[in-house]
Amino acid sequence: MKKLKKKIVITGGSGRFGTYIKKFKSNYDIFFPSKRQLNILNEKNIKNYLKRVKPQILIHLAGLSRPMNIHEIDIKKSIDLNIIGTANITKLCSENKIKLIYISTNYVYPGTIGNYKENDPLKPVNNYAWSKLGGEASVQLYKNSLILRVCMTEKPFVHKKAFVNVKTSFIYHEDVVKILFKLLDRKGIINVGGRSQNIYNFAKKDNKNIKKIYMRKNSNIKMPIDSSLNLTKLKKYLNKNF
């Protein structure tokens, strides 16, 4: 008798990260519902979809990210999509005993000293990060869950300039997808990123012509100066040195 493939539902599959998951070949039966098929703000809609598909795992990508300043301008939208929407998904996953994987961000850390571990104190520097931490709060209540605090970006690096004095742990979307499928059975919180370095050094590997810029102390840009991640836990699970 042929063994049935595990079913995975991915919300927000039409977003940047979701498009990379669609290209990834796996041994799972993966569903990418549209916003009409699975509306994260409509509990009845979510319930009906999950009852019909009966997934074992749900990876929650749906939400509001860019432009970053939209979270300062339209807090209702930010709250609805990133906090209330995630809470709705969490409630229905709990009700249906579905493993929940939530994609969060390294921006939930204070971003001042870097090398942040999963159990370090949290203090977001902008509304986007607060909205993602609000999503984390509901997911934390559900024990059959995994929160990935991810530091990822597009390949190639989309900007023509990069900060020399801002440090992070960038990794490309396509690399995060490979890591994600190796962590499906894990629970708790795991930092996911690459080597700690300034953004300029990261970007110049693929673009030798990228220009240097510097973050000024009194800058209006709300982003952490050093949000680099401690990846000890990730390396342990992947048995990998990087």
Image (tube, rainbow, N blue to C red):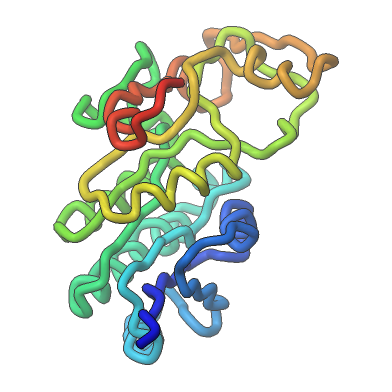
Q: Can you say whether 62 is above or below 44 in the image?
A: above
How far across and down, in percent of the image, does residue 80 sit?
41, 63
**Total marks placed:** 0
Residue closer to the observer: 3 or 35: 3
Write down the quadrant of residue 212 in the picture: top right
Image point 30% across, 62% down: which residue?
Answer: 100
Q: Is residue 138 above or below residue 72?
A: below
Residue drawn at the location 53% of the way across and 64% of the way down: 12
Left or right: 23 as drawn, with respect to 42: right
**Extreme-front residue of the structure:** 1
Q: Position of residue 224 (x, y in %)?
A: 46, 22
State left or right for residue 114 relative to residue 98.
right
Residue 158, given in percent of the width and then of the height, sits at 74, 34
Residue at image coords 40%, 27%? 240
**Residue 209 percent coordinates (x, y):** 85, 15
Q: Quadrant of residue 166?
A: top right
The image shows residue 46, relative to residue 62, as above or below, that is below
Residue located at (75% from left, 20% from top): 161
| Residue extending farthest right | 209
* Horizontal side of residue 157 vs 164, given as left or right: right
Q: Is residue 211 above or below residue 29?
A: above
Work out whether residue 144 or residue 124 is closer to the camera in this orientation and state it: 144
Q: Is residue 190 left or right of residue 67?
A: left
Of the 4 image quadrants, the one containing the N terminus is bottom left
